Image: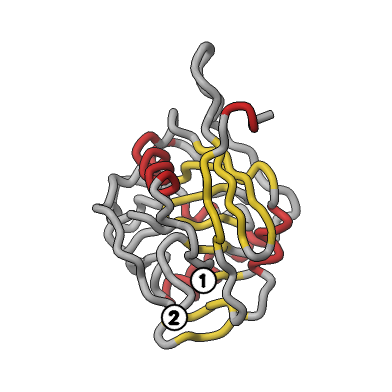
């Protein structure tokens, strides 16, 4: 298998070919690793993503992906994601965001973090995972939401090709909004493919208080 990235067009072509059986699954799979916090510990953080297409609420898993979750929460708290767009969407695959403005300019980001794809969490429908380049430990601000069970993105080993993509959260409300986002007409913007023709903006991304969690 060639090296791939959640930023490069060749990856998406190969990914769709490799993942077609998973993309046709009617029901999402189940995680084999518990994401519940230990007894006596605070509930998992939840984040509200207010988009131009509706709201998405996600739960983050610091117990299973401490670096990825902490990195995401830090970007949320600093307002980094506010105003950025879903810059790449592919039906039956995923919706990617977290780094690009509506003009398709990449926003300056923090240093990359370690890949935590070996945490046992799978890239199932509704999960959030860190996007990266072909270098396994290059994830920074960008992430994607799986809209299908994408087993080919899971950790298979600590080789360059086998590292996979680190899952760090799950959509708990608003998956219909995510589905609507990936169904939007898309095209090319310069070197970027699968860009929604109508910009889909994350207008505000905020950490929810404990009281707002069910």
Residue 16 in percent (x, y) is at 55, 69
Give left or right: position of 57 versus 192.
right
Residue occupying image coordinates x 28% and y 45%: 114
Query: Where is residue 104 drawn, in percent x and y?
Result: 43, 77
Q: Is mark 1 on a helix, strand or loop?
A: strand
- In the rendered view, tell whether residue 42 sits above or below residue 106: above
Residue ID for mark 1: 88
**Residue 25 visible, this angle:** yes
Residue visible at 36% across and 53% down in the picture: 162
Q: How crowded is mark 1: few (under 14 residues within 10 Å), some or many (20 or more)?
A: many
x and y percentages locating residue 22 in the rendered image:
62, 57
189 vs 29, nearest the viewer? 189
Mark 1 and mark 2 in contact? Answer it, CB < 8 Å: yes
Identify which residue is drawn at 52% across, 46% down.
Answer: 206
- Residue 176, quarter of the rendered image: bottom right
Q: Does residue 34 appear in this view?
A: no
C-alpha span from label 1 to label 2:
8 Å
Q: Residue at x 52, y 33 (%)?
A: 45
Quarter of the picture holding the C terminus? top right
Q: Mark 2 points at which residue?
A: 192
């Amino acid at each position: 298998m060639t090296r791939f990235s959640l930023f490069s067009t060749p990856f998406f072509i190969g990914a769709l070919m490799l993942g077609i059986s998973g993309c046709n699954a009617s029901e999402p799979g189940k995680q084999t690793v518990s994401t519940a916090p230990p007894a006596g510990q605070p509930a998992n953080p939840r984040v509200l993503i207010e988009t131009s297409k509706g709201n998405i609420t996600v739960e983050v898993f610091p117990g299973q992906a401490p670096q990825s979750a902490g990195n995401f929460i830090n970007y949320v708290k600093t307002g980094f994601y506010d105003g950025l767009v879903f810059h790449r969407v592919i039906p039956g695959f995923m919706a990617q965001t977290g780094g690009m403005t509506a003009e398709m300019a990449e926003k300056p980001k923090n240093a990359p973090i370690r890949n935590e794809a070996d945490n046992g969490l799978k890239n199932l429908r509704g999960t959030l995972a860190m996007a990266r380049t072909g270098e396994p430990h290059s994830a920074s601000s960008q992430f994607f939401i799986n809209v299908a069970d994408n087993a080919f993105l899971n950790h298979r080993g600590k080789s360059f090709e086998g590292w996979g993509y680190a899952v760090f959260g799950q959509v708990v409300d608003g998956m219909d909004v995510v589905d609507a986002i990936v169904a939007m007409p898309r095209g090319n913007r310069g070197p970027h493919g699968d860009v929604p023709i109508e910009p889909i903006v994350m207008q505000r991304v905020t950490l929810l208080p404990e009281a707002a969690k069910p």
